[in-house]
Image (cartoon, rainbow, N blue to C red):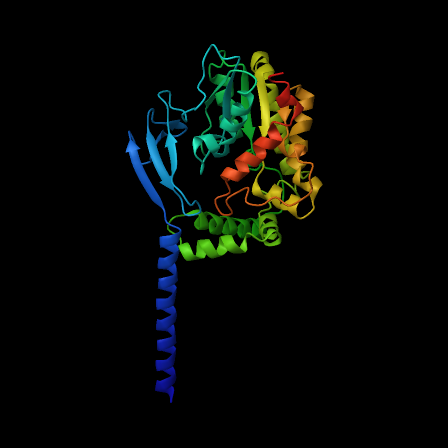
Amino acid sequence: MIKKKVKSIIIIFFITFVFLIIIEGISRVIYNVKISKIKDFSISGCHLEINKFIPNCAIKIKRWENKREILYKIDDKGYRESSLPFNSSNKINFVFFGDSFTYGDMNNEKENYVYLISNYIKSFQSVGYQNRGFPGLGFLEILDKIKNDDLDKFDYIVYGMTPNDVYSLKVKSVKKNVSMIKENENYLEKVILSLKSNFNLRSVQVATSIVLKNDLIYKKIWEKRKEKDFINNSNNNLFKKRYEVIEQKLQSLKKNKKEKLIILTIPQKIQVVNHNLGHFEKSKIFENKIGVICKKLKIKCILTLNNLKLKKRVNKTHFTIDGHLTAFGNKWISKLIVKDKNFLNLYK
């Protein structure tokens, strides 16, 4: 009798194991990853070293959440290639700074908001741009580049700022109760990083992304990341300090650069989730905080979500696990940006 039970358990275990392997195999076929190295690439793709690309590099990458390969081409100066390049004869020349959202991760160059808003102006004025966005950069590194780069030839310096620039900002420690909360947060962050890794089970990644398409579940998990929850914790001491540092650093810019600077807020998925759940004011907390700083320092700001008047749901703006804007998301924020009065004033 016992032998039969053991045999049944082994058979069930074996069938389950085979079934899971088949599911994983199917998931890896459907949600595959592919890298096509085309020209002048290194082991790290087009990355030469920290904060720099290999000039003239070209690479195609397909990540599992994306249905197609994306072409990343780097120009001879080491920036992502522009379809509307800088030209001194242009009426307007932009230079864009920011992280991977500005660089255009997960999207072809002409799908990125950088191109879309520049191309919109092209109907009214001759325009060009240089995209100096780089994946992984934080507020301090981006501001250092704006401070130290020679930008005299550009008419406008556009900083695509995301909430990540706030919550990733390291500031001198603010007293808070850590221990268990910190431990739980670190564990959650490890799980999230694991889900983004190519070494995780693809079936688990796909299943998680399906579950997280539910806005309520997504919101509940996000709110457990207390050090990153820039919405519910925007007025605590840690976030107050972070916004103070941002204000101080922007204040320190030279007058000529401050006059050219435009801060453009790029929304993250959690803001769209809050909008969809009817928390309209919460979804715009980041915009409002940055807006106060801009007004105080007399810096031009385009507060993207403040141009969102309709209260209907918005879907498919971001990749669920990866977090970057989709092609639709880039198009969506571009439509909001071009409505902004500060944007209209650039070419009229």
Whether residue 266 is visible, yes or no, is no
Query: Residue 341 at what x, y percent from top left?
Result: 67, 23
Query: Residue 339 at what x, y percent from top left?
Result: 64, 28
Vertical placement of residue 221 versus 71, above or below: below
Q: Looking at this view, name the residue that lies furthest to the top.
A: 89
Examine the image and state in which quarter residue 60 appears: top left
Frontmost residue, 26 versus 216 = 26
Q: Residue at x 57, y 39 (%)?
A: 268
Vertical placement of residue 153 versus 111, above or below: above
Q: Dividing the image into 4 quarters, which one contains the N terminus? A: bottom left
Q: Is residue 68 left or right of residue 282?
A: left
Query: Residue 58 at what x, y percent from top left?
Result: 33, 31
Frontmost residue, 238 versus 217 = 217
Query: Residue 76 at what x, y percent from top left?
Result: 35, 21
Q: Looking at this view, name the residue that lies furthest to the bottom.
A: 1
Q: Residue at x 63, y 24 (%)?
A: 301
Vertical placement of residue 218 versus 260, above or below: below
Whether residue 285 is visible, yes or no, is yes
Q: Is residue 193 left or right of residue 182?
A: left
Q: Residue at x 54, y 19 (%)?
A: 157
Examine the image and state in which quarter residue 4 appears: bottom left
Q: Dividing the image into 4 quarters, which one contains the C terminus? A: top right
- Total marks in image: 0
Examine the image and state in which quarter residue 2 appears: bottom left
Q: Residue at x 41, y 28 (%)?
A: 51
